[in-house]
Image (tube, rainbow, N blue to C red):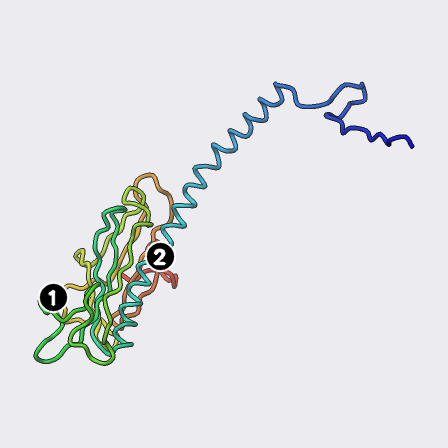
Amino acid sequence: MHPISLPLPSRCVRSRAGNCAGFTLVEAMIALAVFAIVLAMGVPRMSDWLAATRAAAATQFYAEGLALARAQALAHNGASRLVLIENAISGQYDWRVDLCFPTPESPCNDEDGNWSTVSEPVRPAQASGAGVTSIVRSADALPDTARLAVSTGPDEATSVYFTPLGWVDTLAGTRMMRIDLAPAGEAAFPAASVVLTLAGVASRCDPAAPAGDARRCPA
């Protein structure tokens, strides 16, 4: 038997004139130039989209901190607080939620030593708070201050206290009731805010929304 000879695959597609059809050097250079133009147009928009996505994540980051502080107060029937701490990497604020059980002899205030810490559980160790330590979330992954400006109010307050019923403690002096997030530098994305009601409920809003829009932040 004669061995069957299979045709080798062609290395090119032949045109009707019998020549191999393919890209010429000029055509390849034109294709690269078009690709470069499309890339140059798309990269800034992609950068803005990424910045907007990360800014939205930052808004959620702070809203979750406020919600958790209220939830901790309700879950343990104790006082809680949320404290903002500057992050050394991004320059934004980390947040920490502490827990405390006030008594007439030992109220929960800044001078009191009964607040939980990251390493020490809440004191006095009541049954509902035994072993509960502070909860911390880092702002390492947030856009840095060159792209995202974070400000707090009123009067740049960086802490807020909650009663055992989950309401904002109005006796705790200056209390943070709002966190504003706006683009910085050449970043381009919508500004956003997180506002807190006296009932302790945090919600996101749009400071640029027109009057009458449900998304508009309260004055």
| Placement of 71 over or under 50, stated as above or below | below
Residue 211: image quadrant is bottom left
Q: Report the side of 83 relative to 192 (left or right).
A: left
Q: Nearer the viewer, residue 6 or 106?
A: 6
Residue 60 x/y as whole percent = 35, 59
Q: Residue furthest front?
A: 1
Give the residue at x 60% y 23%.
28
Vertical order, 145 against 110 (above or below): above
Identify the mark nearer the N-term, 2 or 1.
1
The percent coordinates of residue 117 (x first, y second) are 19, 65
| Left or right: residue 11 compared with residue 149 | right
Q: Nearer the viewer, mark 2 or mark 1?
A: 1
> How far, Cα to Cα, is label 2 from label 1?
33 Å
Task: Name the residue located 78 percent from the left edge and 28 percent from the top edge.
Answer: 8
Query: At label 2, which amino acid type do we have?
Result: Asp
Contact check, label 2 and label 1, Cβ < 8 Å? no
Q: Which residue is mark 2?
A: 206
- At 30% from the left and 50% from the top, the residue drawn is 140
Q: Which residue is mark 1?
A: 110
Would you place residue 61 above or below residue 78 in this image?
A: above
- Pick out the residue farthest to the right: 1
Label 2 Cα crowd, 10 Å radius (few <14 / some 14-19 / many 20+): some
Q: Position of residue 55 (x, y in %)?
A: 36, 51
Q: Is residue 97 left or right of residue 205?
A: left
User: What element does badge 1 sit on?
Assistant: loop
Q: Amino acid at mark 1?
A: Asp
The quarter of the displayed image where residue 95 is located: bottom left
Please report the residue visible at 26 percent of the width from the left and 64 percent of the height from the top. Answer: 135
For disc 1, the neighbor class at 10 Å (few under 14, some 14 to 19, many from 20) is: few
The disc at residue 5 is none
The one nearer the camera, 16 or 148, is 16
